[in-house]
Image (tube, rainbow, N blue to C red):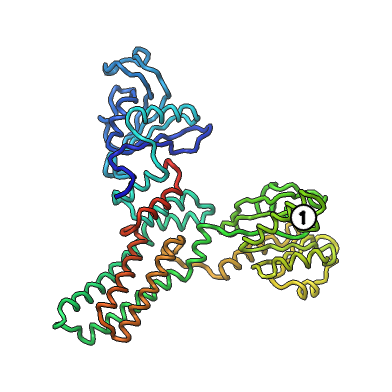
Amino acid sequence: MYKYNLDDTIAAISTPLGESGIGIVRISGKKALKIADKIFLSKDGKKPSQYPSFTIHHGHIIENQKSKIKNQKLHNRNCKVIDEVLLTVMRAPKTYTREDIVEINCHGGIVPLRKVLDLVIREGARLAQPGEFTLRAFLNGRINLSQAEAVLDIVKAKTEKALEIACQQLEGKFSEKIRDLKERVLNLYAEMEASIDFPEEDLDLRSFRFLREEVKRIDEEINRLLKNSDKGMIFREGISVVICGKPNVGKSSLMNLLLKKNRCLVSPIPGTTRDAIEEWVNIEGIPLRLIDTAGITEAKNILEKEAVRRSHDYLRIAELVLFMLDGSRRISEEDKKIFQIIKDKPKIILINKIDLPAQYVLSEVKKLFSGKILKISCLTQEGLDKLCKEIKNFILGGKVLDSEGYLVTNLRHKEALLKAKEALSKVREGLENKKSFELITLDLKEVLENLKLILGESVPEDILEKIFSQFCIGK
């Protein structure tokens, strides 16, 4: 069915490469224990295949093992030691992939990890594809597709709120909701099909009324799921927030304050920032891709021209703009020109340097620049908390998400729900106009297929490849 061979035994390094206290090589498949037998020399003389499930054992990873005498001392064996390790045995079906799994906990250096992985592959495993361990968990029925996607969301979570939502998805709360809707649609489909197959047993008025009311209830529940989907996806994907303004208004200082570290070089010399700087930041639980741009001004040389061009590029993709003004100076023509560039963008206007004697006129700012206006000082941090709350209110519309574990955070899920809703609208219209059940069931089947698509019960191979290609190799 899929290009992945489930009969293969796969292996990969499941921890980031680099110097660390520990690194893990993971093996999954029918030969996992057999491979471990060939390369692991335990302290108690037993082989991994002799150990019970969910046990950890101390020993060495070795190559060129020829002697098979049990309990022989390590230095007497005709073998080469790769690393001293802890080996974990997990037997099918109660494992992540529902296959036999062996995890080798090595020292976390690049060399021992690579040598252990090379040895495992030499003894019969193959290198896993990105996300193939989780794909096997899905294909073997341990999790559904939306739960598999939640695994990726957990790995990539940029805030605690994003992690909380992803964990709810992994627990299956969202899946349970979709499965419940699917079963209800399936019951409607079965009832209509029965009416088609046995026309002599017409639906009575009460049954027909139930069909219409149930379709309406399902439609309302899908609407509730879609209601906060855009905001839900923000917690998963984040949004791009661009800080802009003329040179030396405090853009880099604001970036450093929001990041809570000195990421950007700050100086009183205009034009210090020559290139855009990007960082992820957590603002009130929302992940923001924060971008500090070079000051937009008349370019005097090639470098400044390129810096300004890049600032314009970032402003075009910005989902929110923080437009900064220098409160210690009067509004300039440069400020007005920059505002013309962003006038149609969602924005918050920041009057910085309020710790200095004010030169701006608030009424003039309100007249020239439309949008929410906040006063801040990057030096004293006055107004910073208010800015963070305003960013959150701007993104969430001042509302608190009440997801009950059913929050839609994935674009694929949203698109499937929108298609299901569209088909359901046709079902409602058909019932209202008393069209033939043959036509109505065609639309109902489309609702059913889109709900199945979310759970992965009916999903094209190219979509699977796209989803799992986003995973790292060891997950």
Closer to us: 114 or 103: 114
Instruction: Residue at 40%, 68% (x, y): give it.
Output: 417
Residue 203 visible in image: yes
In the figure, residue 424 lies in which quadrant?
A: bottom left
Give how far across and how far down residue 109 sits, in percent. 50, 29
Q: Which residue is mark 1?
A: 379
Instruction: Residue at 26%, 74% (x, y): give it.
Output: 188
Give how far across and how far down residue 132 sits, in percent. 38, 44
Residue 217 position (above or below residue 181): below
Q: Quick check: 133 left or right of 315?
A: left
Residue 100 visible in image: no
Give how far across and how far down residue 447 sits, in percent. 33, 70
Residue 474 position (above or below residue 412): above
Asked which secondary structure carries label 1, the reply is loop
Q: Quick check: 18 left or right of 261?
A: left
Q: Amino acid at mark 1?
A: Leu
Q: Quick check: 390 left or right of 231?
A: right
Instruction: Residue at 67%, 60% (x, y): give it.
Output: 315
In the figure, residue 117 lies in which quadrant?
A: top left
Quadrant location of the C terminus?
Answer: top left
